[in-house]
Image: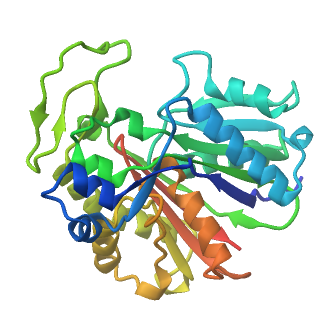
Amino acid sequence: MPVDPATISAVAYYLPNRELTNEQLSIEFPEWSVEKIMAKVGIASRRIAAPDEFVSDLAVKASQKLFEEHNISAADIDYLVVCTQSPDYFLPATSCIVHHRLGLPANAGAIDVNQGCSGFVYGLGLAKGIITSGDACNILLITADTYSRFLHPLDKGNRSIFGDAAAATLVSSKGAGAIIGKMIWGTDGRGAHNLIVKNGAMRSPRSGDTHLYTDEDGNAYNDNYLFMNGSEVFNFTLEAVPALISRILEKNNLKQEEIDLFVFHQANRFILDYLRKKTKIPADKFFIWMETCGNTVSSTIPIALYQAQKSNSIKKGDKVLVAGFGVGYSWGGTVLYF
C-alpha cells in the first residue's frame, strides 16, 4: 500500500512581550557596549517570558496562532509532540496540559520530548514516523523553551544569547506543504557536561549554595544555573556540522549546489558565519533570522522557516536543508522539498 509523505503544512510562533535589549544589557554590564554585543552574537534584542508565563502558556499561544492563521481545527489533531527542556513540572508531561488547554480530542496522543537545539529536527522525525506508519494524519509539533529561567543574572554571555519562544508546526499527510526528506541523526553524550543545568533534578537536587564561579570570559554561574563551555561547544559544532551536511546530502541523493536554502539552528551570528564559510555555502543561500528574538533553542529553525517563507526566500519547488545541533551533544538534519 502506498505511503503518504509527511509534509510541513503550516508554521506559526509566539514571542513573549517582554524585551531585553542590548541597551539594557549594556547598562547592567558597562564593559559590554551595544556595538560589542551585536558584533559578538548578532542579536539586538531577545524576548523574555513574564514571571507568570511558562512553557505551556507559550505553547498554547503559538498553537492558537497556528489554528487561527491557517484555519486548522483542534478536532483534526491526531497527536501532539511538545519539545521542551523547561517543562512546567517534572510530571505530568507538559503535553498533557497543553492537550487539555487546546481542547484536542481525547483519542489524540500527547508526549514530551526533552531535546534542545536539535529538538525541532528530532520532532520532525517522530512526526514523520507516526504519519508514514499510517497511524495518524495530523501531528501538532510544538517547540517551546524558557531558557531565561536557567540564566544567572550576572551571566552576561548567555543572557545576551538566549531568548524565550514557542513555535507550532503542523506535520500532515494531507494537503500541500514541504515534504520531509530522509533524516540524519547524531549523538555524543561525552559533551553533556559542556552545556548543562546540573542541579534541579534527581541526581543533583537544587542547592542553596550561592557561591559563584567565573568562566574564561568573565561570566558568572553556579550549578543551579546554565553552564556553557563556549569554546568546547564551538569546537563540537565545527566538527559535527560539516559532516552532518555531507551525510544529509548523501542520504537524499543531492549535491550541495542543488540546495536552494540552508537553515541552521540559530545559535549565534559568529558561529553561523564561521560554519557558512567552512562549508562553503554562498551567503545568498544561507538564512539567518535571530536579531530580534535571540537563540530560542528548539524554536530557532521553525521561526527561521516562517520568516524565510514570509520574505520569499523560500519559493515553491525549493529544496531547503535544515540542521539542528547543540546541547547533548545532539545533532540532526533533513531536506525539506517545498
Place residue 187 in its image quadrant: top left
Q: How is the image coloured?
A: rainbow
Place residue 191 in its image quadrant: top left
Q: How many marks?
A: 0
Residue in view at x 59 percent, y 73 percent:
320
Left or right: 112 with respect to 190?
A: right
- Position of 258 relative to 328 (above/below): below
- Residue at the farthest front position: 27
In this view, the residue in front, 27 or 39, is 27
Image quarter (top left, top right, bottom left or bottom right) of the C terminus: bottom right
Instruction: Answer whether residue 20 is visible to the viewer in this image.
Output: yes
Could you say where residue 213 lies in the image, as x and y percent from the top left?
11, 32
Could you say where residue 264 lies in the image, as x and y percent from the top left?
46, 65
Left or right: 6 with respect to 159?
A: right
Residue in view at x 87 percent, y 24 percent:
106
Instruction: Answer whether residue 4 is visible to the viewer in this image.
Output: no
Left or right: 276 with respect to 73?
A: left
- Position of 139 relative to 249 (above/below): above
Residue in view at x 36 percent, y 62 percent:
241
Could you say where residue 31 lies in the image, as x and y percent from the top left?
12, 58
- Position of 195 relative to 245 (above/below): above
Could you say where residue 229 lies in the image, as x and y percent from the top left?
19, 45
Residue in view at x 40 percent, y 82 percent:
281
Place residue 60 in its image quadrant: top right
